[in-house]
Image (cartoon, rainbow, N blue to C red):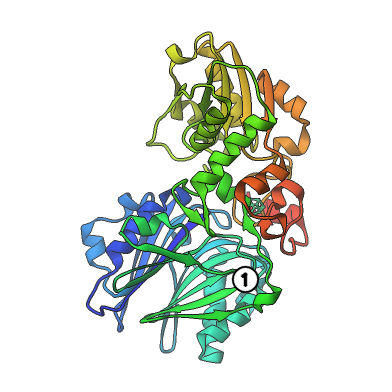
Amino acid sequence: MCGIVGIYSHNQSKNVASHIYYGLYALQHRGQESAGIATHNGCDLSTFGGMGLVCDVFNNGKIDGLDGNVGIGHVRYSTTGKSKLENSQPFVSEFQGGNIAIAHNGDIINSMELREELKAEGHHFRSTTDSEVICHMLSREYIKQQDMVESIRNVSRQLIGSYSIVVMVNSDLYVVRDPVGIKPLALGEKGDLKMVASESVAFDVIGANYVRDVKPGEIILLNDKITSYDMVKPENARRAHCMFEYVYFARPDSMLDGKDVYNVRLNIGRTLHQEYPVDADVVMPVPDSAITAAIGYSRESGLPYGEGLIKNRYIGRTFIMPTQEERETSVRLKMNPIKSELEGKRIVLVDDSIVRGTTSKALIDVLKEAGVKEVHLRVGCPPIISPCYYGIAMATKKELVAANKSVEQIRDDLGVDSLGYLSIESLKKCIGIDEDNLCMGCLNEKYPTQLPKDLQEYESCRC
Ligand code: SF4
């Protein structure tokens, strides 16, 4: 779970660093651990990154120091590799004749084997991330091929996993999306600027237009024009867009692979009412990610929409906090009940998903202490029964509550009066993409790529 941005300006004297900065700002929800930007002015590469939020890492002076009409940026949440400065991106690798800088969103399942192979050849790593592995592989291949598109094709053949990548080879900007398009990546344009970003909201913030999504298995060279190359034959392409982006992760004001995320979430709420109607006084969301689905439930049911929990917006997402202890402590810090809206009420509480169940339990306790009479929990994501191997750091199978308990047991553990999860069939309809073109591996254990040979070892490396 990371956010990436790449921008090229035809105007050689233009500095794109501030546009990248704003783009990263719009993608802050995709990662809050570190942020970084690399730019190139045709002669030299400039780069700067640090730990923390985009606004903490950069100031005017830092942005002014990043010179160039082409650049890439990254916000990070760690899946492979710990949260530390050496793991922040973009990564830069030097070779005779220049630099390669890379920013990556995704997770490479076979990165350990590839790293060992590179180490044996004498490559030195400054980080523990899979993104640096890709960076070394690209520079090794480019030295041999002297053709970046061929190099990307060759490297892609060796990668198993998910990757949306922006690569700057000196002042050329390449864009790559994995063959099944697990992670989102969109293309935008504004005057002399051409840009890509994990989500279209990064275009909105600088007034650029969403042009289209980068196709799965597509390589794009962005310069004065947009030149597209295929990594896989289009007729062989199957798509596997991550369903969780639509349910939870992406911003509701984004377009993902042609779908309006806001509408998907409204559909989820409407369908939750069709599948699990209940007599209640009010529909309330777990803010912020379930707001749109709760509005959908309210509209469909005719029950009033209300707020019962107020979120402290200055705390990051609990779900993507790296340790369990941090996650549990932050729930109460993050959500405060409005007693006058809750006391004596029968509420339909809409949440986007249940992962471990610990956050939901803490929230239900908060609501009960505030005096609710009944809680009917409706969940916009079907039961998550298996881990994600593509960069969403959910949990191990042992920690996933739905992998180990029935819906009735979960209802009982949470202490709610009723519990309803959206069905997989309905989820596909709500998104508007069929099963063959979605990744739902964490819901049905049908993953779109090979999995690690030793799942236990893989999970222990990532915890
Ligand atoms: S396994 Fe689940 S969370 Fe991971 S990419 Fe697939 S749908 Fe998304």
| Viewer-proximal residue among 57 and 314 | 314
Residue 63 in which image quadrant: bottom left
Residue 12 in which image quadrant: bottom left
Q: Which residue is mark 1?
A: 115
Describe residue 76's horizontal placement relative to residue 179 as left or right: left
Q: Is residue 122 visible?
A: no
| Viewer-proximal residue among 228 and 95 | 228
Give the image location of residue 37, x and y in percent.
36, 65
Whether residue 206 is situated above or below residue 248 in the rendered picture: below
> Residue drawn 66% across and 60% down?
240
In the rendered structure, which amino acid carries the disc numbered 1?
Arg
Residue 454 in which image quadrant: bottom right
> Residue drawn 53% across and 84% down?
149
Q: Residues within 10 Å of mark 1 (few under 14, many from 20)?
A: many
> Residue drawn 62% across and 71% down?
115
Give the image location of residue 96, x and y in percent.
44, 89
